[in-house]
Amino acid sequence: MIGLGGAIGTGLFLGSATRMASTGPALLISFAVVGFIAFLMMRALGELVLHRPTSGAFVSYMREFYGERAAYITGWCYWVNWALTGIAELSAVALYVRYWWPDVPSWLTVIIGVAAVVTVNLLSVKVFGEFEFWASLLKVGAIVLFLVVGIVLVVFSVHIGGTGYQASIANLWQNPGGFWPTSDPYVWYGPVLVMSGVVFSYAAIEMVGVAAGEMKNPEREVPRAVNSVVVRILVFYIGSIFLLMCTLPTSVYGTTVHGAAVSPFVTVFSMLGAGWIGNVIQGILIIAAMSSLNSGLYVTGRILRSLGLSKQAPAFTAKMSSTGVPWAGIAMTGAVFLLGAVLNAAYPNQAFDIALEVSAIGTLATWFSLFVCQLRLRRLSNAGIIPASPFRMPFYPYGSYIGLVFLALVVVGMVISGWQSSPDFWGKTDFITIVIGVPVLALLMWLGWFLVKRNVAEHTGGKLDSRWPKLDRNGRPLQDLVPAAGPADERHDLTDERI
């Protein structure tokens, strides 16, 4: 439920509207391709988690296989990712609220949202879990309701109210421009250019890896969670997008009310004359965005604690409450979420899209770390240096290579789509993110590592590299094997979250 709760959010409920309008039915291909990459990523994560469950997840695996600097970069990139994703979710909540109360300032909605999720996370893990379970249940229920209604509409070719539209599979190719529109305002490579936004839609399913560190029986639960989350996400996402496209022409979606984008699910029910159902779903969408935000806060608190324990973040981030909650890291992320109020005050209509696109690069970095860690883990296990994980990723090594190539292509697509998105230079969000933002972030990472390197070295006894030996092309160690970590080693790497 944590994986579902984190992933099913604004990417599907809100972000899909503008992408359908700009891309046409070919968006289905985009969701299918990213879904396959998400499957590979989750299987890579599953292999890593059953190698060693830890709530430090990506940070801890990068530390083990690539050393302290790689862990530092991965951890802070993931934190930046979720800080920006949280701002996107909060901006979506502000848009949802404006649907009913257009006079409520977006920045005020953001502040109230931050206060709510920080409170839930600070109480206890149990309270977080209960909230996430019921929120996820509402989200899943809303999607299942639409799937049932959508299937009935399409199978019986129902006319949609007085709009003149008729639900039918034929809408996929009778849509303006056809299945894959290429004439102006569309471009033939449109489905490729929207990949970054689709990646955002799938983002957060990797939180299963973080939650595994607090599972009672990860050997049983992780394979079930990985496989079920992937299957259900694909059904919910691709199934929903497919039915939305069969119900109405894609050009209908992406409309606004009071300056706020409307969810395609709300659009369908409103055109059916069932506005009250649309209003109920609109309320569920607020809970959905808060749920995803809540999950992100859960993860970042634990990632920051892992960095704090390793002296790669301020010492206070390692603090825990009496109920086992990393309150300091949660509070730090919550404080950054408040920047969303500033963004929404300045750009109330564009805040969601800006934060969504910028946060996608952090998701790509996280998936990259999982693929490269899986490759390293498998090489070491194939060499007999460490035991094989009981839940191995298929298609080795090509699965991870495919994932890495895909991530690189998405970055290229972000540069191109970003440049074309606006005649105004500062409106080219994706282009600025990659060409300017990434180098600036890299510089900040370098400066940060320069500042913390001495403390990290003292904490680890000078051990900054991977604890495992490098291998030659034939999989043979290039140096002497390092003994398994004993009690003296636990202060600095593999079990940092269990001290």
Image (cartoon, rainbow, N blue to C red):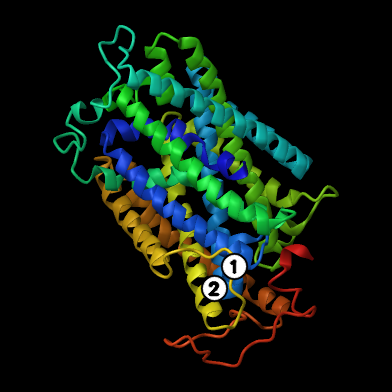
Q: Residue under circle 1?
A: 61
Q: Report x, y in % for residue 402.
A: 36, 63
Q: Which residue is mark 2?
A: 377
Residue name at image x 52 percent, y 42 percent: 7
Q: Is residue 221 left or right of residue 343?
A: right
Q: Look at 30% across and 17% down and name the residue there.
A: 157
Q: Secondary structure at mark 1?
A: helix
- Residue placed most toward the observer, 320 or 133: 133
Q: Which SS class for mark 2?
A: helix
**Callout in the foreground (1, 2):** 2
The residue sitting at 54% across, 53% down in the picture is 80
**Kind of residue at badge 1:** Tyr
Rendered view: 147 above or below 49 = above
**Residue 427 image offset from top left, x and y in percent:** 33, 41
Q: Quadrant of the N terminus?
A: top right
Q: Position of residue 205 (x, y in %)?
A: 53, 48
Relative height, residue 479 to residue 198 (above, below): below
Q: Are dots 1 and 2 in contact, CB under 8 Å?
A: yes
Vertically, is 494 above or below 230? below
Amino acid identity at mark 2: Leu
Q: Is residue 216 visible?
A: yes
As drawn, is 289 to the left or to the right of 162?
right
Q: Earlier in the sequence, mark 1 or mark 2?
A: 1
Left or right of 99 in this view: 64:
right
Q: Residue furthest front?
A: 155
Give the image location of residue 487, x and y in percent: 80, 78
Q: Quadrant of the C terminus?
A: bottom right
The image's mark for residue 387 is none
